[in-house]
Image (cartoon, rainbow, N blue to C red):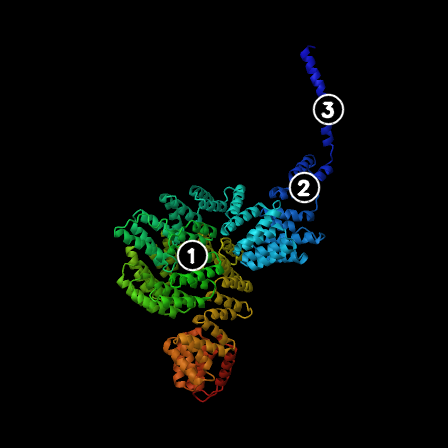
């Protein structure tokens, strides 16, 4: 052996003890039993060392794949690590290998629910668990509720949560489920109550704290939301789901920006983007932070990142356009403005920015036309009249030699429009960020900024804050008409319409020539149903400005609402004669013809216009409507489709095609169109409403309620509450429908909602149907339409005195109200015959062709013995009404029987018999039967008794 070999041998020999030691060590490890490894895994699992537990369990299962206990514990480990598909597989393997199904029902159900496999979860949770402890049974019931909610069955979900709470009243999981149901209904108070109960028993329960934070956020209580969510982050960092964490960071950052804590907001934005760098809301918020720092390029990068994920988000596109303009890159802003205006053609910020761009590029006519067209569509849109005035003023200055290049791009007014628009889109933090960049240099600009703060508070739902700010602004500038109008608007938002009217009346007294105040007074009058007052407000203004198209359109519309369609038509015909090329006036005249039933005149006008504008979407749309009214359904649908194809950027036309399908009985086609429209224009919320109603009408209530949820998730709680009421009403869930309408009414009181609650309470036989009408009349005491409805209800329910008072109040304001006159005649017929006759004659003078009115006068005359005057009126009424009014036939039959002529007897019997067959009220039916018996004993013309 040479030296090299010797050295190798010695090295090898020296290593032997070490290797042997290693072998002994490994052998010692491998000698651990499966039970010992499972025990070590359980200990690691309890210490949240899930990786160590997983290593031990997989080692066992490689050699012992039939070890059910190891599979079960591995399933729990995967569940803790949020590896839900792995957990489902492992729990099923555990069951296959002998583990009791009942013991695995709860964790398997959790994994299935978390992965969205709701029906499988319900199947798993139906495994028998009757011997399980009460706490486990309560958890299983609550989890069933989560699965039912995932499937969209709110009723079954609610029952499951109630079952859970009947076993364990303070169970946080079930209380959270009740809260989620309340949030879906828009019932923030109900959600708050359930979660407060959960937190009082379990103050560190993460799920309850996160949901409470969301409730506070949606209730505009940002300070509370920050406290709740920070506490949840602190105590539940290990147990929060990824979704809970990201939601918490996003809400925290948004609230901290709103409340002026940008440093804290930045930390949460960093966490949100670290978890998901493509999170669109995180990138949007980071852009706001960049704007605060003046770093517009980074802001643009982050908005673009948001748009990469959500490319049609109007809020992000509008902000991007503004950033590009702030960078001095109007060319880069243009594509975004084009897209915004295609989706939201009346967005104030986009209109102002687009007009400013065109002015800067010396495309003055385009800028003016853009705003004039928008103004004609929506003359009352806040800020639009001012924007148009600004552009016209700048054009005048340019024409007189002033240099206005670039005017309107970075002015205070433009930035305020942007802030207001962002607030209306639900981004209060963005609105506040834009406001923070505005540096007003004059007292007028300072007032503009203060006014914008009020408008942003209104848009964000801070009603009390808006009202206080508006009061302060109005006190500082008592002669400022805009400040007074803003105060009135704040009162309207608070539901105090009477105070709004008082403010405007004082403002008008101080500024009698301010047309904007008069318009505001008319709007308040319309909101109260006082159409005659609104007409009285606008008529003198129109006489002073007969060529003001917006005033003509507004006044014509009021005549229609007031039941004076012919006066509206006369007004529009005169305006068209003076401005024959004005499309807005011609189209309004065509619509007025259609509304008044003058379809042939409408079609003639429409075809004349289409001869010159063959593919004009507006005229095609009107032609389609006219064809539908004339009964040409197929032609009408095809024409409406052509109109929608010509205007792909106007989703309202596509919506009208779906509505026409629906009214023609083509429900499935309508639903298909509406679903397509929702995909194409996700921010066009009317489509969501009609889709829900179409689905509810077809019996698919769960699908309809998903549209309600979509509205809530978009922050449109008021619209969601109204739609929720409509859908539940279609489902005949009248009590729930009434509750939804009531929530909407508290947000924005209106006659329509009061009427909806009245109708629902009647249909569902709920308590006090008249209460919503009474409540509305307390705030709007001059609303004639509501008074007539309440009076009719009182009249039918033996409250004739209050009904008469209401009818007389209507006559005080509307002395020619046919309904009030007619019904007062009926009420007074018994005790005050002369008064009744006077009322009936006045009603008949106003509506001589109305069979019901003629019947009232004729029947009263017959009752007072004037058969010679009464019977001809009843004959005319019966001939006009035909089979539609058995009561009129009864009256004529009874009058003929009373006259007693032999020649009348057979006809009287025939009329009375037909009236009974068609259906009469019980007392009138009994009278008719009695008269028929009497007529049967009366001798005929030949003297024989029949």
Instruction: Provide residue 600's location: percent of width, then percent of height.
Output: 32, 64
Marks 3 and 2 close (CB-CB < 8 Å): no
State if disc 1 and disc 2 touch (CB < 8 Å). no
**Closer to us: 9 or 502:** 502
Q: Closest to the observer: 321 or 12?
A: 321
| Quarter location, residue 845 | bottom left
| Residue underneath mark 2 | 45
Residue 14 in sight in this render:
yes
Residue 536 falls in image quadrant: bottom left
309, 49: nearer the viewer: 49
The relative height of residue 498 versus residue 618 in the rendered view (above or below) is below
Image quarter in which the N terminus is found: top right
Q: Tag 3's secondary structure?
A: helix
Seen as rendered, the residue at the extreme top is: 2
Provide the secondary structure element on which disc 1 rests: helix
Report, in whole angstroms, how far the alpha carbon at label 2 lies from the one at label 1. Answer: 58 Å
Residue 20, labelled with which disc? 3
How far apart, in angstroms, are the residues tagged by discs 3 and 1?
A: 85 Å
Residue 946, horizontal then vertical, whole percent:
48, 85
> In this figure, which residue is indicated by the disc labeled 1?
450
As drawn, 835 above or below 535: below
* Left or right: residue 214 compared with residue 332: right
Dot 3: within a 10 Å radius of its alpha carbon, few (fewer than 14), some, or many (20 or more) residues? few
Q: Residue lying furthest left in this view?
A: 400
Give the alpha-carbon distance from disc 3 to disc 2, as whole Å.
Answer: 34 Å
């Amino acid at each position: 052996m040479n030296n090299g070999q010797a050295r190798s041998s010695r090295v090898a020999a020296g290593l032997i003890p070490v290797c042997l030691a290693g072998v002994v060590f490994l052998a010692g490890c491998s000698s651990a039993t499966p039970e010992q490894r499972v025990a070590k895994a359980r200990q690691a699992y309890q210490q949240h060392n899930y990786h160590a537990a997983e290593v031990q369990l997989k080692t066992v299962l490689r050699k012992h794949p039939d070890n059910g206990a190891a599979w079960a514990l591995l399933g729990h480990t995967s569940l803790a690590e949020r590896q839900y598909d792995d957990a489902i597989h492992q729990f099923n393997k555990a069951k296959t290998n002998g583990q009791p199904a009942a013991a695995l029902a709860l964790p398997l159900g959790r994994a299935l629910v978390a992965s969205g496999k709701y029906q499988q979860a319900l199947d798993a949770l139906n495994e028998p668990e009757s011997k399980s402890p009460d706490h486990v049974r309560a958890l299983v019931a609550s989890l069933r509720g989560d699965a039912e909610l995932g499937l969209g069955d709110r009723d079954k979900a609610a029952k499951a949560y109630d079952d859970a709470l009947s076993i364990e009243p303070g169970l946080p999981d079930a209380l959270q489920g009740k809260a989620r149901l309340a949030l879906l209904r828009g019932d923030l108070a109900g959600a708050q109550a359930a979660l407060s109960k959960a937190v009082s028993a379990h103050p560190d329960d993460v799920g309850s704290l996160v949901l409470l934070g969301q409730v506070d956020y949606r209730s505009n209580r940002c300070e509370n939301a920050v406290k709740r969510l920070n506490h949840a982050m602190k105590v539940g960092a290990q147990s929060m789901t990824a979704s809970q964490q990201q939601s918490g960071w996003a809400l925290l950052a948004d609230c901290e920006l709103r409340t002026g804590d940008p440093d804290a907001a930045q930390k949460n934005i960093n966490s949100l983007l670290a978890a998901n760098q493509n999170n669109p809301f995180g990138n949007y918020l980071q852009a706001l932070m960049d704007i605060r720092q003046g770093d517009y390029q980074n802001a643009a990068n982050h908005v673009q990142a948001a748009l990469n994920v959500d490319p049609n988000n109007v809020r992000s596109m509008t902000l991007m356009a503004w950033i590009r303009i702030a960078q001095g890159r109007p060319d880069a802003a243009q594509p975004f403005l084009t897209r915004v205006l295609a989706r939201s053609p009346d967005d104030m910020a986009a209109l102002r920015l687009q007009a400013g761009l065109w002015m800067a590029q010396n495309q003055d006519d385009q800028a003016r036309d853009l705003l004039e067209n928008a103004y004609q569509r929506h003359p009352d849109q806040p800020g639009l009249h001012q924007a148009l005035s600004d552009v016209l003023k700048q054009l005048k200055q340019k024409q007189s030699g002033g240099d206005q290049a670039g005017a309107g791009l970075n002015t205070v007014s433009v930035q305020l429009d942007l802030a207001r628009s962002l607030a209306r889109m639900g981004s209060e933090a963005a609105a506040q960020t834009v406001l923070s960049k505005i540096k007003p240099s004059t007292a007028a600009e300072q007032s503009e900024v203060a006014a914008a703060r009020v408008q942003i508070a209104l848009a964000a739902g801070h009603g009390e804050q808006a009202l206080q700010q508006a009061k302060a602004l109005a006190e500082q500038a008592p002669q400022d008409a805009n400040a007074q109008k803003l105060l009135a608007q704040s009162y309207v938002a608070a539901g105090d319409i009477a105070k709004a009217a008082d403010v405007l009346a004082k403002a008008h007294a101080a500024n009698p020539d301010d047309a904007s105040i008069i318009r505001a007074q008319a709007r308040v009058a319309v909101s109260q149903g006082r159409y005659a007052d609104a007409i009285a407000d606008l008529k003198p203004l129109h006489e002073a400005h007969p060529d003001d198209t917006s005033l003509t359109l507004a006044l014509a519309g009021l005549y229609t609402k007031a039941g004076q369609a012919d006066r509206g038509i006369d007004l529009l015909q005169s305006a068209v004669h003076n401005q024959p090329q004005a499309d807005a006036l011609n189209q309004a005249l065509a619509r007025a013809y259609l509304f008044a039933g003058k379809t042939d005149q409408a079609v003639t006008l429409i075809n004349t216009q289409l001869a010159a504008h063959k593919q004009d979407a507006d005229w095609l749309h009107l032609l389609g409507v006219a064809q539908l009214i004339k009964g040409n359904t197929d032609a009408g649908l095809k024409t409406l489709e052509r109109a929608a194809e010509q205007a792909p950027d106007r989703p309202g036309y596509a919506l009208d095609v779906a509505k026409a399908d629906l009214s023609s009985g083509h429900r499935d086609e309508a639903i298909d169109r509406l679903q397509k429209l929702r995909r194409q224009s996700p921010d066009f919320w009317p489509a969501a409403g009609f889709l829900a109603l179409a689905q509810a009408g077809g019996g698919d209530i769960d699908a309809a309620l998903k549209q309600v949820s979509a509205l809530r998730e978009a922050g449109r709680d008021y619209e969601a509450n109204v739609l929720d009421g409509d859908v539940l009403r279609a489902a005949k869930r009248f009590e729930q429908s009434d509750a939804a309408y009531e929530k909407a009414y508290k947000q924005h009181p209106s006659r329509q909602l009061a009427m909806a609650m009245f109708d629902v309470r009647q249909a569902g036989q709920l308590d006090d149907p008249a209460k919503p009408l009474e409540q509305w009349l307390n705030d709007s005491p001059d609303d004639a339409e509501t008074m007539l409805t309440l009076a009719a209800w009182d009249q039918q329910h033996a409250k004739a005195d209050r009904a008469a008072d209401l009818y007389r109040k209507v006559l005080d304001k509307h002395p020619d109200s046919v309904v009030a006159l007619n019904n007062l005649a009926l009420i007074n017929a018994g005790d005050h015959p002369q008064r009744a006759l006077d009322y009936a004659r006045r009603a008949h003078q106003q509506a001589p062709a109305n069979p019901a009115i003629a019947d009232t006068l004729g029947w009263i005359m017959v009752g007072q013995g004037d058969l010679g005057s009464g019977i001809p009126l009843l004959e005319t009424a019966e001939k006009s009404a035909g089979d539609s009014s058995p009561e009129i036939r009864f009256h004529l039959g009874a009058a003929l029987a009373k006259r007693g002529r032999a020649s009348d007897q057979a006809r009287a019997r025939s009329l009375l018999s037909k009236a009974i067959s068609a259906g009469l009220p019980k007392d009138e039916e009994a009278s008719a039967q009695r008269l028929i018996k009497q007529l049967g004993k009366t001798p005929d013309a030949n003297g024989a008794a029949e």
